[in-house]
């Protein structure tokens, strides 16, 4: 079979996969989440097997432990987080009003003179902008129901995901062997090598980044709570979780945290500075200790590529796309490096180079 025919067949397979993913995106979330959990916990199950446990015993032990941990966290944190979230929603209009008043009075009219407009026009523009922002926020929260986060979907996520994760974790090694047996024989070694590289990139980033997010969430939540910020717990946890997207969690957490600090503490600028110091501490710990040790340079996923993949796949496939973005981004990165490597060895790149000429050394994309 020619290379062109093989490429056409694989392109058709990928096209069918994307089409099915788009058609079934409304029900795939628990299954994709369960697969992600099983992938994340597989090394732990392998290690327990080395200690003498069977795969079933190791899977059961891991499942029971994490279910108990989830129940404890739900009992301890959910009521507090729910209360803070309700209070934060209630206080948002007043927070926006205070921000509007501060923007209008900043510089005692100098802003209007710089822009060449009257003070009333500046006030009107700011008022309309903040009103539009609030309307957008309310519309976004309301639209969450159309993104697969309805009550039924949440319940299915809570009930189905642990079951899917349990069975996939139990049969993970067997499933990998089955997939390996189906690889085309002519290209099996190349596909294995690429798959191992994808796994190395993905494991290094996801498993490392999850730990980074957890540590940052603890630092932000505990630090902001100790400083006395009223909604410090929920702001810190959300900022830590969103840190899975490079820079986004810290930037959003910093903006919201400082805005709340100005609303609560002004004119006590020492307390506001302490809020800023909490985020500075988190970034110092992440940049100097967490990311170099847990993620490292072997990941080879550029932050801009990660952000683009997450936003693009989320826009296309919703929450399911957000979960699949990093695996697909890692795979595309490895395949792109492999393609560039092959291109540098090809006649298309070398042109009429003399026979036996040494092609340039491969470089990472």
Image (cartoon, rainbow, N blue to C red):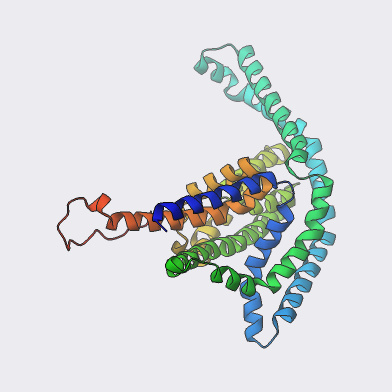
The percent position of residue 350, horizontal first and vertical second, equals: 22, 53
Determine which quarter of the picture holds residue 214.
bottom right
The percent position of residue 306, horizontal first and vertical second, equals: 52, 50
In this rendering, position of residue 183 left or right of residue 339: right
Determine which quarter of the picture holds residue 149.
top right
Most foreground residue, 62 or 167: 167
In this rendering, position of residue 163 left or right of residue 40: right
Residue 57 visible in this rendered orientation of the protein: yes
Residue positioned most to the left: 354
**Quarter that holds the N terminus:** bottom left
The percent position of residue 233, horizontal first and vertical second, equals: 73, 52
| Vertical relation: 153 (above or below) 91 | below
Residue 272 visible in this rendered orientation of the protein: no
Residue positioned most to the bottom: 52
Most foreground residue, 323 or 291: 323
Residue at (31% x, 59% y) in the render: 362
Number of numbered labels in the structure image:
0
| Vertical relation: 100 (above or below) 40 | above
Residue at (76% x, 71% y) in the render: 63
Most foreground residue, 87 or 326: 326
Residue at (81% x, 54% y) in the render: 156
In this rendering, position of residue 231 left or right of residue 239: right
| Vertical relation: 132 (above or below) 117 | below
| Vertical relation: 99 (above or below) 24 | above
Most foreground residue, 127 or 361: 361
Residue at (28% x, 55% y) in the render: 346
The percent position of residue 134, horizontal first and vertical second, equals: 72, 29
């Amino acid at each position: 079979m020619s290379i062109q025919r093989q490429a056409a067949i694989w392109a058709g397979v990928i096209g069918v996969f994307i089409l099915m993913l788009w058609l079934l995106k409304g029900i795939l979330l628990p299954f994709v989440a369960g697969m992600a959990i099983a992938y994340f916990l597989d090394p732990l199950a392998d290690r327990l097997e080395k200690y003498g446990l069977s795969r079933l015993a190791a899977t059961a032990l891991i499942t029971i432990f994490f279910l108990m941990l989830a129940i404890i966290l739900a009992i301890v944190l959910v009521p507090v987080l729910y209360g803070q979230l309700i209070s934060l929603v209630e206080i948002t209009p007043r927070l926006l009003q205070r921000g509007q008043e501060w923007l209008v009075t900043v510089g005692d009219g100098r802003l209007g003179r710089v822009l060449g407009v009257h003070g009333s026009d500046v006030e009107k523009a700011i008022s309309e902008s903040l009103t539009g922002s609030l309307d957008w926020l309310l519309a976004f929260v309301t639209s969450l129901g159309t993104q697969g986060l309805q009550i039924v979907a949440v319940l299915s996520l809570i009930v189905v995901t642990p079951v899917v994760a349990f069975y996939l974790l139990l049969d993970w090694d067997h499933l990998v062997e089955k997939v390996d047996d189906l690889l085309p024989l002519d290209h099996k070694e190349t596909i294995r090598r690429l798959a191992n590289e994808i796994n190395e990139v993905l494991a290094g980033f996801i498993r490392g980044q999850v730990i980074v997010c957890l540590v940052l969430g603890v630092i932000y939540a505990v630090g902001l709570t100790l400083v006395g910020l009223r909604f410090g717990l929920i702001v810190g946890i959300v900022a830590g979780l969103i840190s899975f997207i490079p820079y986004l969690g810290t930037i959003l957490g910093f903006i919201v945290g400082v805005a709340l600090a100005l609303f609560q503490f002004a004119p006590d600028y020492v307390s506001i500075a302490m809020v800023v110091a909490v985020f500075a501490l988190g970034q110092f710990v992440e940049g100097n200790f967490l990311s170099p040790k847990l993620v490292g340079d072997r990941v080879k996923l550029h932050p801009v590529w990660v952000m683009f993949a997450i936003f693009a796949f989320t826009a296309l496939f919703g929450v399911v796309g957000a979960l699949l973005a990093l695996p697909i981004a890692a795979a595309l990165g490895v395949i792109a490096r492999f393609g560039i490597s092959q291109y540098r060895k090809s006649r298309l790149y070398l042109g009429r180079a003399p026979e036996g000429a040494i092609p340039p050394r491969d470089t990472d994309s």
